[in-house]
Image (cartoon, coloured by chain):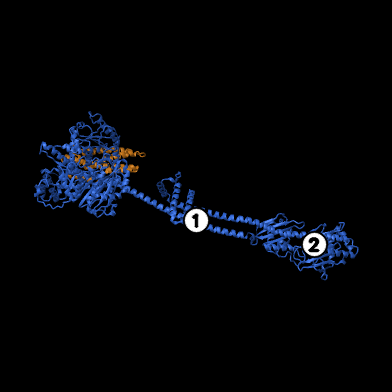
Amino acid sequence: MAKNIDKTSSDSENSLCSSSSSPPMSNKYRYMFNRLFRFANSWKKSNSPRGRRIFHRDVEKEEFQYASSHCLSSYYSVFVVRLAIMVMLAILIGLLTILTWHFTKIYTKKSLSSLAYGLRYELLQRPILRMWNILNSTSEITTAQVKLSQYVIRRYSNPASQAEQVELYEAMRAVTWSLFASRKALNSITINYKNGFVQAFHRDLKDNNTFYIYSDLSNYSMVATTSNMLKSISTHQAWDDKTLHGNFSAIWYREPLDPVTGEKIGKAMKIAPEDLINIAGLSQVPDGVATWHVAVSKFTDSPLLSAALPVWDSSNKSIMAVVGVTTAFYSVGQLMRELVEMHSGHMYLTSQQGYLLATSTSAPLLTNSTKPPPKLKMAVDCEDEIIRLGAEWLQRTYGNHFPNSTHEVHVENAKLGNQQYYIDSFYLNLKRLPLVGVIIIPRKYIMGQVDERSFKTLVILISASLCIFVIGCVCILILTNGVSKEMNLRAELISQLEARRKAEASSNYKSQFLANMSHELRTPMAAVIGLLDILISDDCLTNEQYSTVTQIRKCSTALLRLLNNILDLSKVESGKLVLEDAEFDLGRELEGLVDMFSVQCINHNVETVLDLSDDMPKLVRGDSGRVVQVFANLINNSIKFTTSGHVILRGWCEYPNSCNDSPNFYLDQKKSRNLHKSKEKPNASHAKRISMRDNKVILWFEVEDTGCGIDPSKWDSVFESFEQADPSTTRLHGGTGLGLCIVRNLVNKMGGEIKVTKKEGQGTLMRLCLLLSAPVDVTEQHALNLTDNGLVVLLALQGNMGRIITSKWLTKKGVCTMEASEWNGLTQILRELFHARSSIHNSNNFDAHYPINLEGFKSKLLSIKDMRNPIFVIVVDIGLLDLSTDIWKEQLNFLHKYFGRAKFVWMLNHDTSNTIKTELRRKGHLLMVNKPLYKAKMIHILEAVIKERNHELQKKNMKEGDLHEFLEIDSTHFDAATSSDDSDISEISEKPIVKLTNENEHLEENNSRKEESCSSEEKKAKETNFATQGYDRVTRTRKEVNDKKSLEGLRILLAEDTPVIQRVATIMLEKMGAVVVAVGDGQQAVDALNYMASAEDCRRESLQKDRNTRSQTEILTCHQYDLILMDCQMPKMDGYEATKEIRKSEEGTGKHIPIVALTAHAMSCDEAKCLKVGMDAYLTKPIDFKLMVSTILSLTKPTN
Amino acid sequence: MYSVAQLVEYTSSLFQQGFLDDQFNQLQLLQDESNPNFVVEVVTLFFEDAEKLLNQLEKEIGQENNIDFKRVDALVHQLKGSSSSIGAQRVQRVCIAFKNYCEEKNVEGCFKSLQDIKQEYTLVKTKFETLFKMEQQIFAAGGSAPR
C-alpha cells in the first residue's frame, strides 16, 4: 500500500516540481495530480482491479464514501508520503553525490599513484646507480692498483739492498700516484707492505689538499718482516696485532703534494700513525680475496667505502702487500640532495645493519662523540626528523626482518609526524655490502593537488546536493501542502455532502410527515364535514343554526382544501404522486374551469376569458384532474390578485413535426410570442426531443391577468413552498403560498415547465408548457361550416378581451362580425344594420353619437348587404342593460323590435334574477347562455341558430307557431361542483354540459353523454331506474346529494372480516337504500361473485354471514352486484388477492365490477397498491359516510 | 334511576376523557327504527371480537421466544379496525403503538402494549356497559336516548 502511494506520489512529484515553478500552470497540474491521486485512491481502496475507467461520478462517490470513513487516516498518509518522498530524495541525492565523488577521485588517484610509483622508483634508482658506480670504480682501481703492485713488486722481488728497497718504493709511489691522480673521486690509496712499510696518497676533500703519507723506513727490517710473515701465515691475527702494535712505534710522515703534478710542495711532517687515514692491513684480507667495508675517518664527516685486495708474490703463496682504496660516499649524498631539491622528500641509504651511508639531508652521518674514532650512525638515530621517523616506522612495521627481506617495500600512507608520506625501499644486494635504499616522499607532493581537488569536489557536491535536497523538501512540502489542502477541502466537501444528505433526508421526513399528518388530519376533517352534512340534513334546525352550520361547513371545506394542497405538495415532493394516464377532453375541462371561475370573477368586475387555438387537440392523454388543478390554481391566483380587468387563459399547441406557428388568430399576441419563442428555444428543443417519440404534443398555455403583478426579482421564488410575492398581501388575500408550488411541481411532473414572463402593462403573465400525448386522430375539426350560412354576428359584450378574441376568431372563420361594448354602440349598429331593410325604427330615443364609423365597419355593412339571406345573430350581454333601474325593460322592448329579423342570444350572469329570465322567455328570447363566452359555446350557439333556422325553413310550409323552443346552456353542474361536498379540486373537472333542450327534439339535440345513455332506456326497468337517477343527478342540487336513499337499488357486496366494521358499514349502506351482502373474507367474496355469475337463476346467499334484517327474498331478487367494498386485510384471502382473482375471472367477459378498497392503512402507497391490483377507489377506516356514498355513486354511475 | 341529563353528561364525559370519538356518534346516527338496537349490537360484536382477538394475542405473545410478529400485527390490525369503527379511541391508540412495536419487533413493547390494550379494553367495556345500562333504564322508563 505504501509502495503504491510512493509510486504514484513520485510520479506526481515530477509534475508537481514543475508546477511549483510555474504558478499559473499549477491548476492544470493540480488537476493532473488530482486524477493521479484519485486513481491511487481508487486503486488503493479496492483490491478488485478496477482501473481508471471507473465512471467518474462513481469514483467520486466512492471516494467520498471512502474519504468520509478514512478521512483521518488519509491525513496521516499524507504525512507518511511526505516523509517517504523526502527520504527517497535524500537517498537518491546522497547516492549521486557519493558516486560522482568516488569516480572522479578513484581514477585520478589510481593513475596518479602509478605515476608516483614510477617517479619514486626512478628517484631511488639513480642514487643507487651512483653508488653502484662508485663501488665499481673503487673496485676497478683497487684491482688495477693490485695488478700494478704485483708487477712492480715482482720486479723487485727479493730486494737485496736498502737501495733496491727504496727503488721499489719509489716505483710503487709513482705507479700509485698515477692511479690516484687519474681518479679524482678517490679518497685515498694505501699500500701496506709485508714489512710494515706504508705508502699512502690522501686527498682531503675539504680543503682540496693532497698528501703523501709514508712511514719511516728505518724502523723496518727485512728479517723481522720475514719472520713475521711466516708466522702470519699460520695466524693472521698475530701478524696483524703485531704490525699494529709495531706501528704504534713507527713514525709517519706526511708531505703535501701538488694535486695536479704530484710535486712535493711542502715539508714532510711527522704525524701519528693511523691518525689520518685507514690503512688497509692484512687483517682486511683474511682469505686473500677482495673485501669491502665502510669506514669512518677522522677527517671527513662522511663514511668512506674502502676496498682491500692483497698483492700476492709470484708464486701466489704469500701476500706481499695489501692495497686499500677508499672512496667517499659524499658524491652519493650530493646526488641525493640534488634530486631531493628537484623533487621533494627524503632519501637515505643504509647498510644492512641499518647504518646510514648517505642521506639527502646535510645531517651528519657520524656520531659526534668526543671519543675517537667517530662511528656510523644508525638510521634510527639520524638527526633528521623525517628520516629518523621513517626508519623508526619501517622498523616498527617490519621489525628486524626488514633489512633481511629481499622484497621491496612500498607504503603509501605512512603517517610520520603530522603528515602522510610515501615510503619505498629497495634492496641492493652487493657482496659483503648489501645496501638498502629508502625514499620518503610526502604525500602532499604527489597527491596534494588531487586531494585538494577531490576535497573541493566533495565539498561542492555535498553543498549542491544539500541545496537540491532542501529545494526538493520545500517542493514536497509545497506539494503535500497542496494535497493536504485538497484533502481538507475534500473533507469539508464530504461533511457538506453529509449535511446536505441529512438536510435532504430531513426534508424527506418532512414530506413524509406532512403526507402522514395531512392524511391523519383529513380523517377527522372528513368526519367533521360528514357530521355537518348530517346536521344540515336534519330538519329540526332553526334558520340561524342552519346558516351557522353551513358556515362551518364552508370553513371545514376550505380547511380540507388546504390540507389537500399540503398533501398534494408533499405527495409530489416525496415522489409518490402517480399521474393518471387517461384520455380526456382538455378543451371541455378548461371551459368548465373558466365557467366556474367566471362566477367568482363577476363579483369584482374581472373578465375571465378562455382563448384556445383551433389546432389544440381535442383529446389528450394525461391526468385530467392534475391538469385542471394546475389551471385552477393559476386562475384562482390571478383572480385573487386582480381587482379589475381580465384574466385570460390562452392555449396553443406546438406539434413537434410542424414548425408553423399558431394561426394568425392571435394577431395581437403574435409579436410578443415570437419574441418569447426565441427565448424559449432551448426548452422547446428539449421538449421537442422528448415529444418525437410516442406522438407527444407540447401544449403552451398562458395565464394573463391585470392584477398587481409580481416583482421580477420574485419570479423564481414565487414557485417555492409557502412563498408569496408580497407577504403583506397575505392579510388581504389570504392563502398559504402553496398553490404555485403545487403547480410547478405538477407541471414539472408532467414534463413541462412554468415561469413568469414579462408582460406589457400591469399584471402577471405566467407561461407554461405541458407535454401530453395526443391520440393520432386528434385534430378533428368542427363539422359546422360557419362561412356558408351567411351568418352575421353582432357581439354586444361588456368584456373587452373576450369580445375581441371571439370576434377575431369568428372573422377568421369567415363570419362577419361586429362589436359593441355598450348599449349606445349596440343601438347604433342595429340601426345601421337594419336601416336599409326597414325604416321603421328611426323613432328611437337614443342618440347615435357613438363613434363607430370606421372604414372596416362600413365595408362590413356593404358586404352584409351583398349577402343573400343573412342570419343575424346578436349576442347581448345582459350587463349592457341597465338593471339597476327599470330601464332594462325599455331596452328590451327596443331590442324586441328586431326580434323577427335577428336571433338574439343572451349572455346571462349566474346571478341574473329570475324576473329578467322570465321576461326574456316571455318575449321569446330562448337562447340564453351563461357567461363567459368562449369558442365552444359560440359554436353551440351558432349551431343552434342554424338548426333553428333550418327547422323554421322546413316547417314554414307545414305549420307555424307551435314550435316552442327552449335553448339553455345549462351550468347547474358548476353549482354542484362549487358547492360539492367533496372538496377535492379534481371534482371541479366535472364536465360542463351544454344542454340544448328542445321539447320536441329532446333526444336529437341533446349531446350530453348522460342523455345519450337514455336512448336505451326502455330495455330494462332496472336500468331505466338508474338512468333516470343519473339524469337526475346531473341536475341535482346539493339537497339531492343528501338524499337518504341515494343508493337505492344498488347491490353491494361487502367483504369485511371484522364484525364490527361489517355491521357498521352494512347499516350505513342500507340507510342509503343499498342492498348489502356481507361476507367474511376474500375467498367468500370471490365465491359469491362466481356463484352469481355461474348460477344466476339459483341465487342464494350461501356464504354470507348476514346479520341483515332485510328479507332474503329481496336480496334474492337482485342479480349482479353493482359494487364491492373490499377490506384489504382479511384472513384466508386478503383484499388484494381477492381483487386480483376477480379481475382475472372478469377477463374476456368485458365486465368490470367496481371494487372499492377499505383499509385502515392510511398511507398513499397503500392507495397505489390498491389501484394497482385493479381496485377502482379507496376508502379509509373509519368509514366516512359521505365519502363512501359519493365514491360509490361516482363508480356506479358510468356502469349504467 | 338515571335521568336523561345524567346520561348525556356521562356520554360527554366519555368523549372528553377520550374513550370515544365521533365515530360513536356516527354509530348512534345510524340507529333508527329499522335497527333499534344497532349501537348495542355493534358494541357487543366488538366485545366478542375483541375478546377473541385478545385471547389470540395473548397466546401469540406468550410464546416468548419466537413471536410471530406478522400474525400479531395482523391481529392488532383487526382490533384497531374494529375499535376505530365503534369509536373506542383509546383502544385504537394503544393498537397503533402496539403495531409500531410489532414493526420494531420490540418484545417488551409488545408485552406492555398487550397489558395496555387489556386495561383499556376492560375500561371501555365497563364504560359501555354502564352507558347501555343507563340507556336501557331510561328506555324502560319510556324515554328515548338523546341524539
Cα distance between the residues tagged 2 and 1: 80 Å
Type of amino acid at the residue the image marks with label 1: Gly
Q: Which chain is orange?
A: B
**Residue count near mark 2 (Cα–Cα under 10 Å), binned few <14, some 14–19, many ≥20:** many
Type of amino acid at the residue the image marks with label 2: Val
Locate residue B63, reporting x and y percent: 35, 38
* Disc 1 chain ID: A
In terms of image quadrants, where is residue A1136? top left
Q: Is residue A694 left or right of residue B129?
A: right
Q: Circle 2 is placed at which residue position?
A: A325
Q: How many numbered markers are drawn?
A: 2
Q: Colour of chain A?
A: blue
Q: Secondary structure at mark 1?
A: helix
Q: Secondary structure at mark 2?
A: strand
Q: Is residue A842 left or right of residue A58?
A: left
Give A1182 or A536, whichever is nearer the viewer: A536
On residue A472, the disc is: 1
Farthest bottom residue in view = A267
Locate residue A899, reporting x and y percent: 11, 44
* Disc 2 chain ID: A
Asked if one can make out residue A523 in the rendered structure from this viewpoint, the answer is: yes
Q: Is residue A888 left or right of residue A433?
A: left
**Residue count near mark 1 (Cα–Cα under 10 Å), binned few <14, some 14–19, many ≥20:** some
